[in-house]
Image: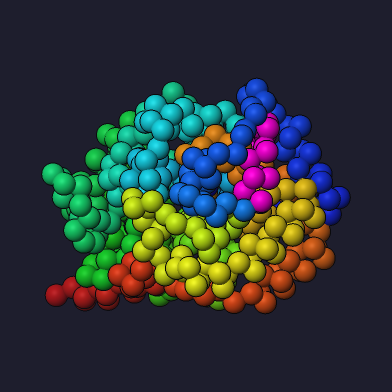
Amino acid sequence: MHEQDSTANGNSPGRGRRGFLMGAAGLAATSVVATAAQAQAHGGPSAAGTSGAARRRNQVTAAVTQTGRRRLGSLKVSSIGLGTQTMPGNLYGPVTSRKDMVALVRTAVDQGVTLFDTAEAYGPWESERIVGDALRPVRDNVVIASKFGWEIDPDTGALTGLNSRPDHIRRAVDGMLKRLRTDHIDLLYQHRVDPTVPIEDVADMVKDLVAQGKVLHWGLSEPGLQTVRRAHSVLPLTAIQNEYSTLWRGPEENVLPLCEELGIGFVCWAPLGMGFTTGTMSPYTRFVAEDRRTAMPRNSRDNLAANMPLVQLLEEWAVRKGATPAQIDLAWLLAQKPWIVPIPSTTRLSHLLENIGAEEVRFSRDELQELNAAVARITISGDRLPPPALAMTGVEAPPRRPAA
C-alpha cells in the first residue's frame, strides 16, 4: 500500500524525474508493470477505478539512494522514513509474505532510509517483530520508533482501550525490546493521550526508562496542545506524530507553530492521505472487505468525488515537475519546514522507491507559494477518521493531583 501507507533550488521541470530514474544505487533497475494487485496495494481500488496517474506511477523503473537528513529535535534521521503499519497485512488487506516485508525493510536501509516507525498495536506486535528481524544486522545505523499506550488482549490481540499507567508503560517497553531485538528504542511515542493518566506521570516513567538506557528520545502522537507543553516541561519532546498531507492540513493551525516554538520535530503519518493523493483512488473505488479505509468518512463515494480537485492539482504538478502525484505530496511536506519528516507506509518495492524519490523534487520559492495557494483553495469533504478514532485525537491529559 502506498499508504498508505525542500525548497529553493528552482530545478527545471523533469529534473526530479530524471534524477529518480538515473539515480539507481545498490539496486538493479527494475521494470514495474501496472497491475490491479499493485494498484490495490498502492492504496487504490480493488476493482475498477484506477486512473491514468496510477498507470504513470507504475512506470518507475529504477531506484534512488536517499541522502537527505533532517533533525527531529536532536535526533538525526533520513528526510523520508518508512512506516510499517501495513506490513502485518491486516490493515488494508493481505501482503505477499512476511519474508517479503523483512526484505523490504532491509532494502529501505540499503537505499538510505534510517527512520523506521512501528508500534505494539500494529498487528498487534507483528510489525515490531518484522522490524526487529530486518534491522538487527544494522541496528547501530538506524533509528527505530515505536509506540505504547494501548491495552491489548494477550490472547486475541484485540485493542481493548487506552492504558498509559506507568507500570503498564514499563511492561510495554520491555515487550517492545524483545520483539525489536534491541536493547533500546530510539524514539518512543505515547500512541494516544490517555484521558485518565496525567501526562506528568507518563513523562516521569519515560524519564526513568531514559535513565536506564532503554529509551533515548520520546514523543506524542495526536496530543492536545497543553498536554504537549506539560510533557515537554518534564522531559523535552523530540517529535510530535500527527496525520498531515495536502489532504489533511489540520496541524498547520496550532500544532506546527507549537513545535516550532518548542523546538520539537514533526513526523507525518498518512502523508499520502491513506493512498488518496497518489492518484490511485476515484469515486468508483471499492475497497476489499478487509480494508479499514471503508470506515473513513472521507472515503465515501460523494466525498471522494468532492475531493478529486486535489488529485487533479497534484497530477498537474506531477507533469510540470516530471514526478508523480505521490512525490509531489511528499515533496510539498518536505518544503513546509526543515524539521518535518513524512513516514509513508508501503508493502511494495516500487512504491518505496517512488516515495524516497520525492527527495529529488524541489520547488522554487515562487513555485511553493503558488502550490500552497492552490492547495489552500481546495475544500476537503469528509472527516479523516471514524468518530471513535477522531475522539482520541487532540485529547488533553488530566491534571496531576498535588501530593498529599
Vertical order, 56 against 309 (above or below): above
Vertical order, 28 against 92 (above or below): above
250 horizontally vs 20: left or right: left
**Residue 98 location in percent, x, y?**
37, 31
Residue at far front of view: 48
**Residue 373 location in percent, x, y?**
72, 73
Please report the residue visible at 74 percent of the width from the left and 35 percent of the height from the top: 21
**Residue 183 location in percent, x, y?**
33, 34
Q: Is 118 one of the magenta-colored residues?
A: no
Give residue 101's quadrant in the image.
top left
Q: Looking at this view, is 35 or 318 the one in front?
A: 35
Magenta span covers which residues?
A: 52-68
Vertical order, 386 against 281 (above or below): below
Q: Majority secondary structure of the magenta segment?
A: loop
Quadrant containing the C terminus is bottom left
Please report the residue visible at 36 percent of the width from the left and 56 percent of the height from the top: 292
71 horizontally vs 358: left or right: left
**Residue 140 location in percent, x, y?**
47, 30
Residue at far right of view: 12
Please report the residue visible at 48 percent of the width from the left and 62 percent of the height from the top: 243
Vertical order, 372 against 27 (above or below): below
Q: Looking at this view, is 81 or 296 the one in front?
A: 296
Q: Looking at this view, is 37 or 160 the one in front?
A: 37
Please report the residue visible at 59 percent of the width from the left and 58 percent of the height from the top: 277
Q: Looking at this view, is 273 or 255 the one in front?
A: 273
